[in-house]
Image: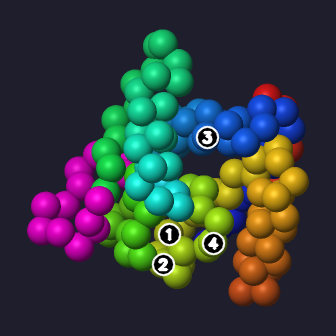
Amino acid sequence: MKVDFYILSGGGESGHTRYTCRLAEKAYKLKHRIYIHVNNGVEAQQLDELLWTFRQDSFVPHELCADPLSESKPESPIIIGYNNVAPDGYGMLINLSQGIPKFYKQFDRVAEVVADADTLRQISREHFRFYRDQGITPDTHQISL
C-alpha cells in the first residue's frame, strides 16, 4: 500500500477541495478508479458540484455513492461517499474526512490532502502517525496553490 500526503500551502480550507478535484482529474486520466471519502452528505454534495465546475475545460466523470451496499453498483470511475463501507473495485482512496476510514486497507493507494488551516493540519498529523504506526511510511508532497 502506498500512502501520500499532499501538504498544501495557500488556498485555506477551500483550497483542499479544489486540489482534490485536480488530483482526481489526474488520477482519472491515468485510468485509476477513485473513491473520495468525505465527512458527510453536505460535503459530498459540495464536492460533487465542484467536480463539474472547478475548471471550464475539464471533464471528471463521477457520482455520489449514497448507499454502497445497494444492489445498484456505481459505475463511474470516481465515486464520492461518506459511509462506513466503500464500493468494491476502486484502487485509490482520497481521504478528506477527519478520520481514517476502517476500509482504507482495501485500496492500493491512499491520498491525504492536507489543507492550509491549523486545525486540519493537526488532524493530518494524527493520520500520518496512524499510518506510520501501521508500518506504512507515507510520502509527503509540498504543493503551492
The amino acid at mark 2 is Phe
Q: Is residue 4 left or right of residue 51?
A: right
Report the front residue among 110 and 71. Answer: 71
Residue drawn at x 46%, y 13% as measured from the top left? 57
Q: Nearer the viewer, mark 1 or mark 2?
A: 2
Quarter of the image where the C terminus is located: top right
Instruction: Find residue 139 and report its horizontal and vertical position in percent.
Output: 79, 60
The amino acid at mark 1 is Phe
Q: Residue farthest to the left? A: 71
Which mark is first along the chain, 2 or 3?
3
Q: What is the span of residues highlighted in magenta in the rendered image?
A: 66-79
| Number of residues whose C-alpha sits closer than 10 Å to that of mark 3, classed few (under 14), some (14–19) or many (20 or more) | many
Quick check: marks 1 and 2 in contact, CB under 8 Å? yes
Residue named by callout 2:
103
Residue drawn at x 41%, y 39% as measured from the top left? 48
Whether residue 45 is situated above or below residue 82 in the rendered picture: above
Q: Nearer the viewer, mark 1 or mark 3?
A: 3
> Helix, strand or loop at disc 1?
loop
The secondary structure that most of the magenta stretch takes on is: loop
Residue named by callout 1:
107
Quarter of the image where the N terminus is located: bottom right
Residue named by callout 3:
17
